[in-house]
């Protein structure tokens, strides 16, 4: 079984072999150059101006293979989604590998192949890369950074400053699957049926929603920290109260069972293929209809709304419980699920 | 002494504190958003079309602090240089941190501050970032990925296909300093005077050279694998013979001594602030004159030339030694200097 050696990160012949043998057949890295050179023209045509979206994420998930995906498609989808939620069409992706000496080349092949498939599915090109190798014991198998570039039509712009009382909070599907899939693999728990990661590109879904772009206030990709963290960030930056309803939060029975077993709140669990959006109440129905017309948006639903100004609750996320109570949804403080992404 | 905890990478409140307390004061990350949104307009003005340059690099150097720099300014300069050598004006940088639990926050502050200074010096903006924390023992202190975007005037384009027999090979200064600085720190060797890393941004130097852009064939930033690796890559992709002269290679007496002590070839040693270029023989003198007018280009010099077609030597790098011999400069095979960048 072939394994990664220090020389694979050396800048020398072994690294060339890895790039030519393994990366170039799967990615769009056409030439060994210090930077990819890309054409801007299509975004610069007269009356067709675009803004540039730029994002970065490192992936350190453990285990690297989990039900429903692996670190490779996670890294592509995560970066595609970060671009999609600001209204961008994701176009170009860079990949930076940090690999521990001794890592199985067959596992690297599986990861690279998953990245290539995910990129094709999302319609993005992996155009530039970098590989570093650490000595054994100085990393944990493999870490991947993906950075991404996308283009946003200049008429589109979202932000927490656009949110108004009465706006609706929606999610695109059942929450908590990614976090529970990784945790069950790590803790060797088995649920029936197996909980699969929801890792998926959101750009197709978002692209369809953009026909209502002037009624969309903000979109988020609620990964680390889950819905709790994303909603708290929005509440703080908008200075408004967000109210969600326990009975409206969609998640599967298996995720519910796993959360009870592990003693965690499903709202804190990471998602990798879920869109969270705040939209105008006047267009929430047609927006949901469009979302439900897409596979990954089939279970799109309203989970709450933006409250009216009330200085006691501004900047706070509240949940109305099934039994009629109300409690604050706080931002997760520390690390509940280490290395979920 | 404050240390990094797992929660600093959680997506929750501790991570927010780190971003707001430490990163936002130093970087240009204006809002906590999934992607930075950047204006393209200046590059889209009529008759002013640009191409996009996109690059990525992960930095895993050990030790992270070394004479003349640290992993932070190295990460900024390295990505700036990858953009500069394709003729781009570097503009935007993303930063992805992977930090080991227990890492000293004071050390992180020093690194972030060095990144901020390096970005200002190079005229680039750090516009988006990401932080992941691994459990103790699952990384080695800190790893940094920087990706970068720059813009290339559409009239500028370099490539190994432009190289012609008779072209001159030039470097912008004394080679080997970065690699020797890191190695001497790691092996606790002391040289008098201390060898300092040459980490520096090359974009100012390159910008001046671009007035001769149609006489520049290719530029490289000879980091990992040193001059040997960069020249071999060019020889292979151009299919031409490159000839360098031992007597013309510029390096300091301390670097010479260190290479002898460590049994390594200075041509294989990493540089982080050196430009390697192949230029037309007709303009080599004015190009060198411009380069020498810039601080970091003071010691710019010709080190060799491109040979005429000879099927026995095409695609090969040769060195003429001081004593009149000739030998092949091969691409370094494995890892000579683990984690130099």
Image (cartoon, coloured by chain):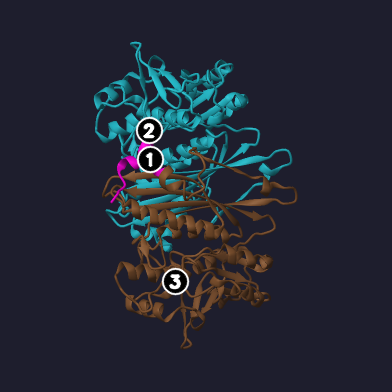
Chain colours: A cyan, B brown
**Residue at the spot of label 2:** A225
For the record, the magenta segment spans B1-19
Distance in Å between CA atoms under marks 1 and 3? 47 Å
**Can residue B309 be seen in the rendering of this structure?**
no
**Can residue A135 be seen in the rendering of this structure?**
yes
Distance in Å between CA atoms under marks 1 and 2? 10 Å
Farthest top residue in view: A323
Contact, mark 2 vs mark 3 (Cβ under 8 Å): no
Distance in Å between CA atoms under marks 2 and 3? 50 Å
Pair 1/2: label in front: 1
Please tell me if label 1 and label 3 are on a single chain: yes
| Helix, strand or loop under label 3 | loop
Q: Chain of mark 1?
A: B
**Residue at the spot of label 1:** B15
Give the mark nearest the N terminus, 1 or 3: 1
The dot on residue B330 is 3
């Amino acid at each position: 079984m072939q394994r990664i050696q220090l020389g694979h990160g050396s800048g020398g012949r072994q690294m060339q072999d890895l790039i030519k043998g393994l990366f170039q057949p799967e990615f769009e890295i056409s030439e060994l150059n210090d930077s990819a050179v890309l054409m801007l023209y299509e975004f610069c045509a007269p009356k067709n101006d675009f803004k540039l979206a730029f994002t970065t994420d490192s992936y350190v998930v453990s285990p690297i293979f989990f039900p429903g995906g692996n670190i490779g498609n996670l890294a592509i989808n995560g970066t595609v989604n970060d671009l999609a939620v600001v209204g961008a069409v994701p176009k170009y992706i860079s990949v930076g590998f940090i690999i521990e000496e001794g890592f199985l080349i067959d596992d690297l092949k599986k990861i690279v192949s998953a990245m290539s498939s995910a990129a094709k599915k999302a319609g993005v090109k992996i155009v530039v890369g970098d590989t570093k190798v650490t000595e054994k014991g100085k990393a944990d198998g493999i870490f991947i950074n993906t950075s991404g570039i996308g283009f946003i039509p200049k008429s589109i712009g979202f932000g927490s400053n656009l949110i108004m009382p009465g706006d609706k909070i929606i999610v695109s599907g059942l929450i908590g699957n990614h976090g529970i899939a990784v945790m069950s693999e790590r803790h060797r728990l088995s649920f029936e049926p197996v909980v699969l990661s929801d890792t998926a590109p959101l750009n197709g879904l978002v692209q369809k929603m953009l026909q209502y772009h002037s009624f969309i206030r903000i979109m988020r990709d609620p990964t680390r920290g889950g819905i709790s963290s994303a909603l708290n960030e929005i509440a703080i930056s908008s200075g408004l109260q967000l109210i969600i309803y326990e009975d409206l939060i969609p998640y599967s029975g298996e995720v519910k069972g796993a959360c009870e077993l592990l003693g965690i709140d499903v709202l804190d669990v990471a998602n990798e293929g879920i869109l969270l959006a705040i939209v105008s109440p006047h267009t929430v129905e047609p927006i949901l209809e469009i979302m439900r017309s897409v596979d990954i948006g089939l279970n799109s639903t309203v989970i709450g709304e933006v409250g009216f100004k009330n200085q006691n609750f501004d900047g706070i996320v509240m949940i109305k419980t099934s039994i009629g109570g109300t409690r604050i949804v706080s931002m997760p403080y520390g690390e509940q699920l280490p290395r979920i992404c």
